[in-house]
Image: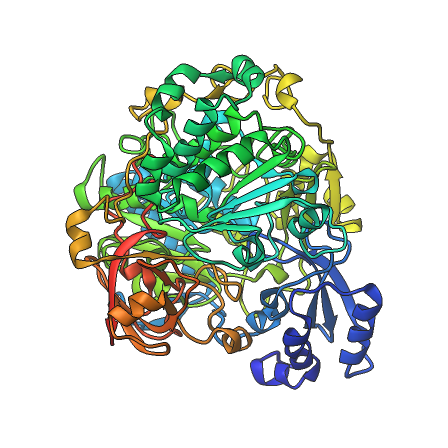
Amino acid sequence: MELNRRNFLKLSAACAGVAALSATGCSPKTLEEKNEDSEALQTSESPITKVRTTCGNCHNDCGVVVNIQDGVIISIEGDPEHPFNQGALCPKGQAFVDVVYSPDRLKYPMMRVGERGADEWKRVSWDEAYAFIGEQLNAIKDKYGAQTLLYTNGAPVQNIVRNAFCEFYARYGTNNMVGAPNLCFVPRLVALKSTYGFRDEEDYNNTDLIICWGGNPFASLRPGAYMCYEKHGNASPILDAMERGAKLIVIDPIFTETAAKADQFIPIKPSTDGALANAMANVILAEDLYDHDFVDAWCHGFDDYKTCVEPCTPEWAEGITDVPADTIRELARLYATTEKAALHEGNSLALHSNCVQAVRAIGCLRAICGKLDKEGCNVCFPTVVGHPVAVENGNPTGMKTTVTADAVNVNSTRYPMFLNGLPGALDAIETGEPYTPRGIMGYHTNTIMAQGDYHRNLDLLKTLDFICYTEIFMTETCQQLADIVLPDVTWAERYDYRTYPSEKGAVVALRQPAIEPLHECKTPYAMEIELARSMGMDEGYPWTTDEEFIEYALSPSGLTLADYQDNPVQIVGTHDYRKYETGGLRPDGEPGFDTPNGKVLLYSIPFEKNGYDPLPNYVPGFGTPEGSPELAEKYPLVGTNRRTVHYVHYKYRNNPYLLENHPEPELSLNPADAEARNLRDGDAVRAFSHRGEAFFTLRVSERVKPGVAWVDGGWGNPWDKPDSNMNRLVDNVTRDPLSQSPDISSFLMEVEKA
């Protein structure tokens, strides 16, 4: 039968599978329960085929089993054999059936026929689409040079987001990847890798103290970054640790789900985290609680660092952070004297205009206490971001490139340590320095929605000669900007892979298609090689099919695609602690850290070389009253954003099942702030700042610190409530000087009744 929405809904099994959301939640099921469910869902005599693969909704990349009957996905379950989720699956994963078969999906290439933003389109064939794209790209290259083409991608919730089209852009001649790294963990990565050479994971399975700083692990199945933890009777390794007697402390402006389970909650003003970290270091050094042996052997610039934090007394920090001086002292002493202590800094810390130095301050705090790559602390577990590298990850890692050595990246002069952010490219569009970009191609990203300063993004990108996006739905960015939109497949219709750290070694998991691509949708790798072929750029391409690319990417693991098809989850390598003593942290195999001199850089050599402060001195964020006192007179609230369990970034708010749980954009205020504005719970409110306005439903809650507005982000697509995009309020002109991060977690605003 023709597979359309109406016929799909006749398969009652799909409805029953998604309706089970409220009953199953995020709880894992036994194999017996899963088999019973599958039998109950079966409505025909056709057998159910089970495909083990990997979810691609968010960074978790949980293992899943996709149940297929009559060629149609009828339900999705957690894979009990996958070491990340061990059978658990959140509502987003279970409800993904409706995304695959959504009537809103893009089904074939669409070319704009009206003015940009008019939402007028015509269907074209793939040959017509490739010919049009090739014509536009050749015109840009011939007239302005290949470097004037930007390419952008979104959060790498799947590795394909990092890898797709990279070889094509290299052959075309541009290295201007200007995606959304400035909005995610990458600013933290700049801070941590430049300080000690790796992005750490918390060793929850062996720790006695957990400090969760600006993160909310219990809002998802993700307790760390990508780590696969052993679980012992609980849904989370954090709960396992607490059951063993470990203490949990949460530092956050919001009383989160994680804070509700903590032994101690420390509310803090947004964007003042660097001041708290330096004050903790002040106590640890003043009371001689630091790890002398580790500092003497493995740290660079200790005397300069000590001078830096000497004025940062707890009393000084109390006036900045609202955290009492005695609380700071107790926290510092507890962290320094607990041998096995893990300090988790969350992604909200990456979204302030002072974020890199704040995260560096936390990294230095770990170092002076000797809590790096040590059992129960913050560890470099083996994965793609550590050593050994388990898989190839993006271009250039062996793929042929033709970008010339003297090519000037659009961000190289303003952001030499962070070349991949979009805000700097927008500056170039506005100023013409170092040159004016002329086109952009985007994959898996909702550019004008995700970046702060919606109106500025829209106005500047509209001036480009050519805009192409590849997407599953006609997003706000596609509708407002694109000249042509290419229909992407979902993760259930293609190959990909994901790596995860673990105590046993690097976990490498295959994502394999459960069904063939629907409609006229193509995989990005298929689009890439076909576009390259149509433009005469395919000679000697290192791969020609999805399978060949996956084979290439997985080759460092020593296993073939066939090996992963037989068992989609493999363990590569082993893990040891204190690898800085044995050469396990450096690609050259020498002892030490992967930094210019092999030591933890309390005084940063790369920062000094590039003209930045080499020490983690605290500077108030722009989006705070201390950072912008004149703006604060008119906009006294500090807005902040936190993830919701129901959605991912700007995705899936057109999923009816998820909407039942979170149907509208919300803004939360402390009761004192609501009363001062004569506002009540449930009111329709207008939030406004010096950049714009957006509209929400008010929630009055003591979970929010006074003076803070907890703003629900991710709304504003064509299917959402109009003018509900939080990023209309966010300034993206003033940003972190190293990482281009805007103040999404701290921006000045005000609220009134709509």
Which residue is outermost to the right? 32
Residue 313 drawn at (x, y percent): 36, 31
Q: Nearer the viewer, residue 681 or 5?
A: 681
Q: How is the image coloured?
A: rainbow
610 on left or right of 568 = left
Of 24 and 244, nearer the camera is: 244
Q: Quadrant of the C terminus?
A: bottom left
Looking at the image, can residue 104 be seen?
yes
Residue 114 lies left or right of residue 711; in this view the side is left
Outermost residue, front direction? 326
Is the N terminus in the top left, top right, bottom left or bottom right quadrant?
A: bottom right
Viewer-closest of 661 and 459: 661
Residue 554, image x and y in percent?
Answer: 67, 39
Left or right: where does residue 420 sit relative to residue 487? left
Q: How many marks do you count on the picture?
A: 0
Which one is in front, 685 or 692? 685
Tell me where residue 500 appears, x and y as whole percent. 64, 43
Q: Is residue 94 left or right of residue 463?
A: right
Residue 357, by quadrant, is top left
* Relative vertical location of residue 569 with respect to residue 107 in this rendering, above or below: above
Question: Residue at left 65%, top 55%?
Answer: 62
**Residue 725 figure quarter:** bottom left
Residue at (56% x, 56% y) in the render = 523
**Identity of the residue drawn at 47% across and 27% down:** 284
- Taking the spot 16% from the left edge, 55% from the top edge, the residue there is 633
Compared to 580, does 416 lie above or below?
below
171 w.r.t. 608: above or below = below
How far from the left and from the top, in percent, is residue 552?
64, 38
Q: Is residue 402 visible?
A: no
